[in-house]
């Protein structure tokens, strides 16, 4: 029986918009608006969605890189949001993050040795005399050479730099790693190398990943479970196979159908959405997707759909937030456009 | 290759180099291809392969320290490299147009949408200001911008990313060009918006009968929109084929490696992704023989020593690889089927 390593309840992250004469708070950007989910130990949960859906904000809020507005983040039984700065810093030993841009996330004036040493120093996980050995070991773990320890970041390629970012995260022996678009900046052939490395490390060190990405091909490859977000809300969550092969929310369906397939003979039933993602400052009422949804009705404009599952259509743990899962599935409701 | 009479553009041995610190960096090194009229050619490759420099060379937009060193670019039978700057200015935006990856940086932030679309037709078609505004409105309708009358007087910052890219397309198409060069037109956009833009380019191409060169790193986009594909690696074309052949029966080990290392959202893949060992060579450290040899799982001494030519496979498709020539001195190889086992044996 695997336990939940991370439990997020009713997490909200609002960013105030200041304006007016005295810089009063005039409104909020509701980047993440009341979401709850759990991550089991040793699994990879991916968060997918388009820009502005709140996927990165969720990752940052869990690590308290931005202070969440409200909610509860329980990691290993500890409520992270109630900790003070010092206690939180201790927890960060177990919670690491790998960022998107390997050019911006590593100090250009530090050698790799210094980067890794600093991580271990702050968390004090490895006695000073053992650190040199540990660094060598880390370099080999991520597929870099020992002789490269004294080089500066600019001497490495993008893929190698991302490996340094991974080594830094691993240096403190974490339990959970948030991968925020960690392979998005890399070319396909290099991306495949880094993805394989992440998978191998997960097996070797029993890591848990919260994998944030907009690339659904990558997500299908690396995840156990997938969570789809739209405008700060979870629209669908479930195991990888259910979400990809049997999506229930109209947004998930259009998202999947919009991705070009590298096969010119593939027969595809593409749904091309109208319009753009609305602003998260004044998100649409009711279901946030109703302004673009081909199935939307008046009910969708007024009532916010809850995450729910239909026992006949969806397996355990597969949930979608739509009023009309059954009607769409049975063909009773037809899309208004394609 | 395709019928010469029906090509809109014919690029021959194009060479573009950059001169930095007294050293020559060959970004495009002998690129040859053509685009059949009314068709879409995709140029694919990873960063640094020279695909963008190829397109900028066609537009003659290479500035110091870059220089087009040689070759021919025949557009409608005339070599663009012989044209004066004034003649080029008449061609750009009129007969050949270009759209770029980042619509925010390629639109002018201090002019309205109407000004920017109108500018092209006022210069090239000598329309009056009033007529230009009408034309702008017509173009905004064509690219499917909602309530176009209101959008005419908007500034770029008032538009979303997808709408900005539509405005870019409207500007590019205002003079009904014969050739559109789209350099990563959807890379900065979300997938649902990307689908809209790709559909738009496809529809407009049919409607206006233009030819398109689409530059991208995304093999999915290529499969969906292109008729022909040129795969570039380290400044050279390694494979040219029609889109069905390229995806069904790729011949160059680089093309195969690229296709196999791509994780797909529509298929489950067990185990590790297949990878291409190592990384793209830097321009100052180009391999002597085949540029892909240091990463190729099939490479032999002949590959490391001698650069293969881009050879016709008889069906109009071309590949630059020793395996597909008579000179190949190794065991028989089926690149597509044997790639994974060969790659796993690579040290």
Image (cartoon, grey):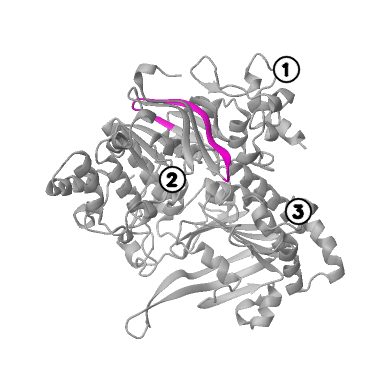
The secondary element bearing badge 2 is classed as: helix
Choose between A205 and B200: the one closer to the eye.
Answer: B200
Is residue A307 visible in the rendered image? The answer is yes
Mark 3 vs mark 1, CA separation in Å: 37 Å
Q: Are marks 3 and 1 in contact (CB under 8 Å)?
A: no
Q: Residue furthest front?
A: B22
Say which of marks 2 and 3 sits in front.
3
Q: Chain ID for label 2?
A: A
The secondary element bearing badge 1 is classed as: loop
Q: Could you say where residue B200 lies in the image, as x and y percent from the top left? A: 33, 41
Which numbered dot is residue A3?
none
Q: Residue at x 75, y 53 (%)?
A: A148
Q: Are marks 1 and 2 in contact (CB under 8 Å)?
A: no
Q: Could you say where residue B186 lies in the image, as x and y percent from the top left? A: 42, 46
Mark 2 vs mark 3, CA separation in Å: 42 Å
What's drawn in magenta, residue-wise?
Answer: B21-41
Q: Residue at x 76, y 72 (%)?
A: A121
Classed neighbour count for the residue bearing mark 1: other residues with Cα under 10 Å, few (<14), some (14–19), many (≥20): few
Which numbered dot is residue A258?
2
Residue, disc 3: A148
The secondary element bearing badge 3 is classed as: helix
Dominant secondary structure of the residues highlighted in magenta in the image: strand
Q: Chain ID for label 3?
A: A
In the rendered image, the quadrant that contains the N terminus of chain A is: bottom right
Say which of marks 3 and 1 sits in front.
3
Residue, disc 1: B329
Asked if residue A286 is positioned above or below residue A195 in the image, the reply reads below
- Would residue A56 be counted in the magenta stretch? no
Mark 1 vs mark 2, CA separation in Å: 45 Å
Say which of marks 1 and 2 sits in front.
1
């Amino acid at each position: 029986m695997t336990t939940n390593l991370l439990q997020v309840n009713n997490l909200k992250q609002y960013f105030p918009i200041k304006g007016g004469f005295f810089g009063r708070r005039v409104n909020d950007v509701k980047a993440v608006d009341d979401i709850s989910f759990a991550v089991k130990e040793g699994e990879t949960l991916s968060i997918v969605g388009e820009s502005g859906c709140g996927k990165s904000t969720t990752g940052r809020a869990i690590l308290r890189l931005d202070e969440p507005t409200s909610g509860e983040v329980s990691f290993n039984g500890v409520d992270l949001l109630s900790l003070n700065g010092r206690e939180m810093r201790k927890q960060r030993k177990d919670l690491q993050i790998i960022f998107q841009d390997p050019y911006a996330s590593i100090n250009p004036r530090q050698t790799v040795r210094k980067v890794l040493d600093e991580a271990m120093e702050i968390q004090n996980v490895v006695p000073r005399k053992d650190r040199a050995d540990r660094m060598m070991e880390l370099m080999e773990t991520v597929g870099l050479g020992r002789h490269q320890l004294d080089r500066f970041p600019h001497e490495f390629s993008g893929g190698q730099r991302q490996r340094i970012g991974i080594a830094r995260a691993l240096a403190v022996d974490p339990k959970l790693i948030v991968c925020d678009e960690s392979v998005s900046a890399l070319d396909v052939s290099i991306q495949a190398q880094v993805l394989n490395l992440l998978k191998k490390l997960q097996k070797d060190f029993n890591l848990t990943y919260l994998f944030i990405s907009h690339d659904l091909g990558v997500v299908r490859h690396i995840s156990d479970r997938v969570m789809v977000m739209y405008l700060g809300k979870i629209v669908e969550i479930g195991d990888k196979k259910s979400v990809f092969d049997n999506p229930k929310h109209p947004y998930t369906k259009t998202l999947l159908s919009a991705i070009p397939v590298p096969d010119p003979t593939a027969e595809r039933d593409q749904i091309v959405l109208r319009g753009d993602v609305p602003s998260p400052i004044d998100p649409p009422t009711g279901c946030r997707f109703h302004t673009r949804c081909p199935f939307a009705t008046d009910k969708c404009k007024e009532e916010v759909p809850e995450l729910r599952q239909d026992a006949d259509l969806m397996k355990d743990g597969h949930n979608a937030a739509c009023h009309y899962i059954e009607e769409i599935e049975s063909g009773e409701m037809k899309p208004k456009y394609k | 290759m395709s019928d010469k009479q029906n090509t809109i553009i014919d690029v021959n041995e194009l060479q573009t180099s950059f001169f930095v610190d007294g050293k020559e960096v060959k970004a495009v090194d002998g690129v040859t291809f053509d685009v059949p009229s009314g068709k879409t050619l995709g140029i694919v490759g990873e960063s640094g392969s020279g695909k963008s420099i190829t397109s900028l060379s066609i537009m003659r937009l290479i500035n110091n320290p870059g220089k087009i060193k040689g070759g021919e670019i025949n557009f409608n039978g005339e070599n663009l490299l012989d044209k004066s700057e004034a003649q080029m200015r008449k061609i750009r935006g009129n007969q050949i147009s270009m759209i770029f990856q980042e619509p925010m940086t390629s639109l002018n932030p201090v002019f309205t949408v109407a000004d920017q679309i109108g500018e092209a037709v006022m210069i090239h078609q000598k329309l009056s200001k009033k007529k230009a505004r009408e034309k702008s409105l017509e173009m905004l309708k064509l690219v499917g911008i909602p309530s176009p009358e209101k959008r005419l007087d908007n500034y770029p910052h008032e538009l979303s990313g997808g709408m900005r890219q539509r405005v870019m397309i409207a500007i590019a198409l205002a003079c009904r060009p014969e050739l559109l060069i789209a350099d990563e037109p959807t890379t900065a956009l979300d997938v649902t918006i990307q689908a809209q833009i790709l559909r738009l380019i496809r529809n407009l191409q049919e409607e206006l009968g233009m030819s398109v060169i689409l530059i991208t790193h995304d093999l999915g986009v290529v499969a969906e929109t292109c008729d022909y594909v040129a795969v570039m690696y380290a400044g050279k074309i390694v494979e040219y084929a029609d889109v069905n052949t390229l995806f069904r029966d790729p011949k160059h080990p680089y093309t195969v490696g690229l296709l196999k290392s791509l994780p797909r959202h529509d298929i489950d893949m067990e185990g590790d992704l297949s990878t291409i060992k190592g990384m793209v060579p830097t321009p100052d450290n180009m391999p002597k023989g085949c540029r892909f040899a240091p990463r190729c799982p099939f490479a032999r001494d002949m590959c490391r020593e001698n650069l293969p030519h881009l050879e016709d496979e008889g069906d109009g498709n071309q590949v630059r690889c020793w395996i597909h020539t008579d000179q190949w001195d190794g065991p028989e190889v089926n690149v597509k089927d044997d790639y994974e086992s060969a790659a796993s044996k690579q040290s």
